[in-house]
Image (cartoon, coloured by chain):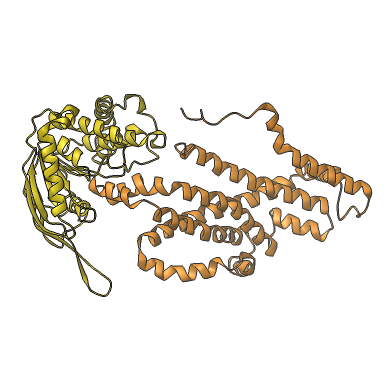
Amino acid sequence: MTSVSLAAQQLTITYTLPGGRSLPALGPITFAIPAGQFVCLVGPSGCGKSTLVRVLAGLQPPTGGAALVADQTVTEPPPEVGVMFQDANLMPWRTVEDNIALPLELAGVSREERRYAVHALLPKLGLADFAHAYPGDLSGGMAQRVALGRVLVQRPGALLLDEPFGALDALTREQIGLDLLEFWRQEQQTILMVTHDIHEAVLLSDRILVMSRRPGRLAADVAVTLDRPRAIADTYHETFGQIAASVRDAIERA
Amino acid sequence: MKGSRRESRPAGRAFVPLLLPVLVLLVWQVIVSLGVYPEFIIPSPAAVLAKFVDVLRDGRLLANTWVTLSQTLAGLIIGVALSVLLGYAIAKNRLLDDLFSPLIIALQSTPVVAYAPLLVIWFGSGPTSKVVTSALIVFFPMLMNTVVGLRSVPKSLRDLMLSLRATPWQMFIHLEVPAALPVLLGGLKVSATLAVIGSVVGEFVSARAGLGWLINDARYNYDTPLVLVAVLMLAVIARVLYAAVGLVERRMLAWRR
């Protein structure tokens, strides 16, 4: 699928508390992500990052304003978008292979085509030997790879990733991040990834959106000017440190 | 990979489950040999065995077993089907939950034995009243398990299915059923043995055939060996049904091991 743009226009989320008081949780926030760009979203916890992802994914309607995918207002989960959550969220009764194939199965893709698509993906995910394993037998890193496979198998035009590697140890998350970059290099999907790890955001993305404290608004929009392809060695680069410092600064002022 | 974790028992351990029954038989025989109680209160194991062979030969045992078993199975199937349907509706709909819950809790805490006579008055002393009693005794625990099972479906997996644009039917068949299955099968295991009780309670009230009727009939004639044969047969039925559900469970929940 060709990559699609993502945007938010004056988007707000306000919760009504028991007793009628209203609690602004997010926004108003406005941004536009052109097709094919890799953007990371950072900000203090509770600022509404995950909520923003849910709205863009069509899982929750905004209170005001609009979320747009491919310039269309989101009213239900858009078919072009693949979502990945912090928890691997696998079905424990399905094997690795069947978990990855789930989106295709729901879309009515034939069994042979599903097998073909999944088995093309498994080696790239480092899961070649685990096609028939159950999630209960996998490590946290492997489970997240399965979740990544499940979102990639849909060949989505845009990926919404909500702290996808947040629960993994530092080494595992760096490696799986670089693997994600490799998939992105080949498919050029638009990616919006929530992370609380500045290091990860600078290493992976083209651009970092910094959100303010609740109700989250756009506090800063930092361009990551490092060359591609990226490697771990880039993290020792002077520019890397400068960008990371400016992002940290923006979060602290936010 | 499946089953590799389940270690095979060492040869000697296969006999462990047999130890207690053998011990019970021995104690039983000793009590009889001491002659403390007359034969019509505690008959000897040999007398019970002889009675067993007797009623097996003249066909009474199998005929009555079949009556009870068929009533039990019919009650189990009807009770499970209805409770799963209503349970699904209740789990999905708060209004139905509020409507039915008070009545269900009230009925569940009423012993079946108490209203079984009513069922016989309404449905006659034939098999129908026993099927209804079985279905009712199964209904409430199975209903609870269905509601609990369906409510235990993680919200995060629901979100995943929604983001994949799953239809309500796909949500049901690919998420709700497999997620609720462990709890449902747990309920089915309990229900299988409860259904036997329902059948027998119905037969105790009024019947013309079945193991419960046989027990009552034998009791009036002080035929204690026959009572024991029928009781053991009921135990066998319950155990076999329980094992059958266990087998289904192991096959369908292979992923849990």
For the question of whether residue B71 can be seen, the reply is no
Residue drawn at x 62%, y 43% is: B240
In the image, residue A147 sits, relative to residue A250, either above or below, namely: above
In the image, residue B205 sits, relative to residue A191, either above or below, namely: below
> Where does the image place residue A235, in percent across and percent down from the top left?
17, 32
Q: Is residue B66 left or right of residue A164?
A: right
**Identity of the residue furthest to the right in this view:** B35
> Where does the image place residue B224, in percent across and percent down from the top left?
82, 54
Q: Is residue B198 left or right of residue A39?
A: right
Residue drawn at x 22%, y 34% is: A177
Chain A: its colour in the image is: yellow
Q: Which chain is orange?
A: B
**Identity of the residue furthest to the bottom in this view:** A19
For the question of whether residue B105 can be seen, the reply is yes
Question: In front here: B91 or A142?
Answer: A142
Toward which corner of the image does residue B215 lie, by quadrant?
A: bottom right
> Where does the image place residue B14, in percent across and percent down from the top left?
68, 32
Toward which corner of the image does residue B245 lie, by quadrant?
A: top right
Q: Is residue B2 left or right of residue A236?
A: right
Number of marks drawn:
0
Residue drawn at x 28%, y 26% is: A119
Question: In front here: B64 or A60?
Answer: A60
> Where does the image place residue B254, in percent across and percent down from the top left?
47, 36
Residue drawn at x 55%, y 42% is: B246
Question: In front here: B72 or A96?
Answer: A96
Question: In front here: A173 or B241?
Answer: A173
